[in-house]
Image (cartoon, grey):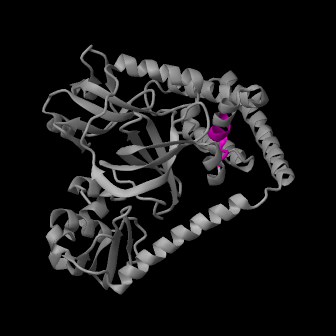
Amino acid sequence: MQLTLEQVLQMAPDEASAAAGKKLQAAKFWQSLGQNEHAFWGECQGSAVYQVKVDLSNLGYKCSCPSRKFPCKHVLGLFLLAVSNRQALLEQSSPQWVAEWLAKRQETATKKETKAAEKEAKPVDEKAQQKRAEQRHERVREGVELLDLWLKDLVRRGLAGLEAKGALPWEEQARRLVDAQAPGLALRIRRLGELPGSSPDWPRVMLGELGRIKLALHAFQRIDQLEPSLASDLRQWMGWTVASEELEKVGEKVIDNWMILGQWIDEEDKLRVQRTWCLGSESKRLALVLQFAIGTAGFPITLTPGMQQRGAMIYYPGTGRQRAQFAIREEQIVPIKTAPAGHASIEAFLHDVASALARQPWLHAFGCLLQQVTLTRSEERWFIPDSAGQSLPLVDFDAWKLLALSGGHPFSLAGEWDGFKLRPLGIFLEGAYRLV
């Protein structure tokens, strides 16, 4: 394991957990510290003695404390201790409580593989499957027609007055779409309720988003006439999920050394969505890995920003070929060092964005790796300019750290562009990748 302290702190679910984890990184708070080629572990003395263990094959972790935060402060503390003072963890055989946990993880993984194989071998009731698909399509179609009428009324009346109405009208439409089995579309309608009054130019942004939704509604009414790949994109955008067994059959598999460039978590009510951007060092393919968790539950797999791991990524079907998930991950995890070639200019990047939108107009996020850019500040806003003088505005965040890391010199920047602002993830500088 070659994590940095910065990478460990990025794993924290919030600032309070990070601060609490820092306090526990001293060896004096721990007993029974140990490590071997499979795991490292320790017991932390708090209101009780909590057993913490970490699986080195994929950095999975477990703590016996009752915390509903993942990772908890004890897991963060052990990670920080292992990074800052690894010699404090004695080389030894796993104690029973660690060995049993590792064996259970392996057993669970084996059962999952067996269950998947059995499900694949089981004959599919195609008639029942087709009937369910038709019933859902009809429910979504009815929901789309009602939303279309509502949007026409909204535009005919005009956007004035939406600020005073608040989020309630949008919430009502979103609930109806959830009932119509179109949760993806419901989420987008709900987010529109946050726009009125959010900025001086919110009406322009609102009209753009309404136009994109109207295009989707129009396309769904003619979905049988679309190319299969674009129809798949539209269904996923509306809220259809792609089952794992289907993804295995129709998804594009790419084996590569995957750089985990960065991640963050969006929260929608009780649902947390982890967004992780990865880049294949050989294929130069970007992949957006989405993971979902309810409440404070942990995410299915641990993806550590700033690290690199060889494995197979499966891309979801469609024209976008952007969202993906790991199918296989090898055990070795190493820090990112080499900077792959990216876009030489902002103009070249935006040209590729325009091409992607021409193929799939409902894309709303674009990963990027920009070469030879710098950082500048104008009218209390931060911008990323390139050598040609073009620039992109940054999301609202404290960019002084990024300025300190670069020292004002050009660097390669990994980030996500949403059509309005750029979210920095990390920079390649002096032979190392640094998270921001």
Along the line of sight, which residue is nearer the eye, 246 or 72?
246
Residue at figure coordinates x 67%, y 36% from the top left: 232
83 versus 347 height, above or below: below
Residue 65 on image: x %, y %: 38, 78
Is 225 covered by the magenta stretch? no
Is 199 placed left or right of 183 in the picture? left
Q: Which one is nearer the viewer's eye here, 317 or 422?
A: 317
Vertical placement of residue 422 versus 158, above or below: below
Give the x, y percent position of residue 182.
69, 44
Q: Residue, x 14% and y 37% (percent of image)?
A: 404
Q: Quadrant of residue 375?
A: top left
Rendered view: 48 above or below 157:
below
Front residue (pair 329, 221): 329
Q: From the viewer's perspective, is residue 266 above or below residue 341?
A: below
Quarter of the image that includes the C terminus:
top left
Which residue lies at the image location 21% right of the left edge and 25% below the top edge?
376
Observer able to see residue 380 = yes
Which span is picked out in magenta?
234-242
Percent of width and height locating residue 98: 36, 79
Picture coordinates of residue 272 (x, y %)?
Answer: 49, 54
Residue at the extreme left of the image, as rendered = 407
Q: Can residue 169 be seen?
A: no
- Foreground: 419 or 99? 99
